[in-house]
Image (cartoon, rainbow, N blue to C red):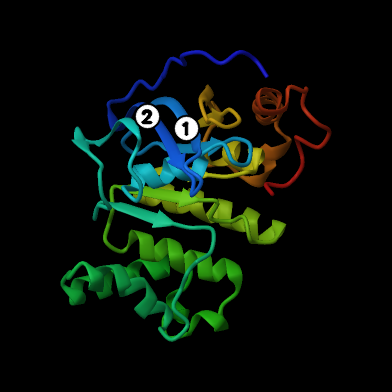
Amino acid sequence: MPAIGRIKDTMEAPPIIRIDHVDKIFTTVAQEKIQALSDISLSIADGEFVTIVGPSGCGKSTLLKILAGLQRATSGVVELDGTPVSAPRRDIGIVFQNPVLFPWRTILENVLLPAEVQGRPMAAARARARELLAMVGLADFEKKYPMELSGGMQQRAAITRALVNDPRILLMDEPFGALDAMTREQMNLELQRIWGESRKTVVLITHSIPEAVFLADRVIVLSARPGRIARIIKVDIPRPRSMAVLSDPAFARVCGEIRKLLYGVEDEAGAAGGGLS
C-alpha cells in the first residue's frame, strides 16, 4: 500500500460536515488500548453523496457512529454547520445493514416511529410518510407487515423511516450488504433516484468498490486499522448513472485505483462489466 500522509481535502463547495483530526481509541475489558481511527480530517458539502470504503475492521462503522453522535471521538472535532456533534440529532437520519423493522407494526407504523419518538405532529408526519412510501414504490404496502415484504422492500421502508423527519444528513452503514446481487443493483438505482429528488447529504459505507463508485460524488478510501484517509477520489462520471456505466472505461479506472490502494494490486478481471455486490 502506498505511504499514507496528510491528505488534502479537495472539496470545493462550503461544508455542512467538518471532521477535524479525529482519533478513536477503544479500551478492552483487559484494559488494552485499540486505536480504530487515526487523524481523520474531512469536509462534506451540503447535498453531496460520499461513500467510504476500506478493509474490514478499519473503523468505517465507528466513523459513521461518531458522525451520528452515537459514539464520541477520543480526540478531534466533528461539526454539523459549525455545531459540535456530541449526541444523536433530529437532523441526522441513519440506515443500518438490517432494516430493524418491528414485526408487530405495519410498514406505515414503522416509518412513523421516529416522528412518534420525537413528538412530531402526527398528521403532518403521516402525510410525509405516505409521500415517501409512494416515492419508493411502497404506497400499496403501508398496511402490510415486515414479514410480508421482500428484503429489498424492507430496506426501502427503512430508508423511508430515516427520511420521515426530513433530516439534512442521511448516514448509511452497509445498507444493501444482506441483499442478493440483483436486488442490490435495483436498490442502488433506487437510492440514486431518491438522492436526486431529495438532495440530502448522504454518507454511505460499503465493502463493494463498484457500489461506492456508482453512487458517489467522492469516495473516501480508508487504510487498514487504525483507519486513516488513504485517498479522496472524485468520481467525474455524469449523473444519472445506469447499470451501463459498469462497463465504462472511466468507471473501471476508478475501481482499479481504489483496488490498488486497498490491495496493492492492479485492477482485477471483472472490475468493469460486473455487478455492484
- From the image, tell me which residue sits under label 1: 37
Left or right, residue 178 beside residue 124: right
Q: What element carries label 1?
A: strand
- From the image, tell me which residue sits under label 2: 22
Residue in the image at 61% along x and 30% along y: 224
Residue 158 to residue 142: above or below: above
Label 1 crowd bin: few (<14), some (14–19), many (20+), radius 10 Å: many
Residue in the image at 77% along x and 40% along y: 273
Specify the farthest residue to the front.
30
Q: Position of residue 138 (x, y in %)?
A: 47, 73
Query: Foreground residue, 211 or 60?
Result: 60
Q: Position of residue 16 (x, y in %)?
A: 28, 34
Specify the farthest residue to the right.
269
* Residue 253 quadrant: top right
Q: Where is residue 163 in the image (x, y as percent from the top left)?
A: 34, 59
Is tag 2's residue or tag 1's residue first in the polypeptide sequence?
A: 2
Tell me, yes or no, if residue 148 can be seen here. yes
Query: Do residues under tags 2 and 1 come within 8 Å of each other at their CB atoms?
Result: yes
